Amino acid sequence: WISLVVIFLLGWLSVFLIFQFVDISRDMLANEFEQLDQDAAMLALTMRNQTFTTLMQVITNFGNWYAFLGVFVILSYTIYKQRGHIKSPLISVAIITGASVVMYILKEGFDRERPTLDTLVNASLSSFPSGHSMISVVFYGFVIFYIWQVSRSLFFQVSSTTFFIVLITLICWSRIYLGAHFASDVLAGIVAGVGWLSTSLLIYLVIKLIRKKEQELVG
């Protein structure tokens, strides 16, 4: 029954976040986030110094594909050593691929221009939603989910969750700090990321539950 409760909550969360993203998108198109974007940009400018800029440039790279690849390789190796297969890490590839396609479609659809003032990084594609934010939430969120699935250590579960949540937060802030995105882009990326992750986990758990029931019937 616990699995059914989790599936219900993920289903509710998925639907809720779809509507939230629609609301954010509508407000962005109506320039309702103009004040938020300006305030966040000003805060970023007041925080800028050489040391913090270097740190943000390093952290933002953890939202790139090569960082995901590194974590994926480590995760796959660890799981293979423990269980003799890499089925679950491969699921993350499918989830990330789907999220990347959705992100590209959204960016092309909204076609929002990126910030042009005080930009410290070069970025391609359009601005809305933030790809770094969305994909980081999806990938590292799945890592958190998987750690809770396989680890027996509460300390490791909690500490890993805290670490990855902090990392996601810093990646999201780095996109504003470096002038790559407006705050509303990042907000939309987070909502879209959590929405895609919850939908993907919903499908994953439903399939897993069906297969378990089938095995029980066969057994």
Image (cartoon, helix red, strand yellow):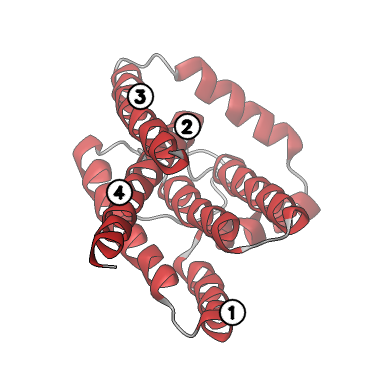
Horizontal arrangement in the rendering, residue 209 relative to residue 168 (left or right): left
Count up the numbered dots. Answer: 4
* Front tag of 3 and 2: 3
Q: Residue at x 43, y 46 (%)?
A: 134
CB atoms of marks 4 and 2 within 8 Å? no
Determine contact: label 1, label 2, CB under 8 Å.
no
Q: CA distance from mark 1 to mark 2?
A: 33 Å
| Residue type for callout 3 | Phe
Along the viewing direction, whichever of 89 and 104 lies nearer the viewer? 89
Q: Quadrant of the N terminus?
A: top left
Check disc 4 and report the residue beneath it.
Answer: 206
Distance (Cα) linking label 4 and label 2:
29 Å
214 or 185: nearer the viewer:
214
Indicate the quadrant where residue 88 lies: bottom left
Q: Position of residue 71 (x, y in %)?
A: 56, 71
- Numbered badge on residue 16: 3
- Label for residue 187? 2
Give the image location of residue 11, x and y in percent. Answer: 33, 33
| Figure check: 62 above or below 183 | below
Q: Residue at x 76, y 50 (%)?
A: 52
The mark found on residue 50 in the picture is none
Q: Under tag 4, what secondary structure? A: helix
Say whether residue 156 is left or right of residue 83: right
Whichever of labels 4 and 1 marks the residue nearer the N terminus, that label is: 1
Mark before the other along the chain sequence, 4 or 2? 2
Q: Residue furthest front?
A: 219
The CA distance from mark 3 to mark 4 is 19 Å
| Mark 3 element type | helix
Q: Nearer the viewer, residue 103 or 16?
A: 16
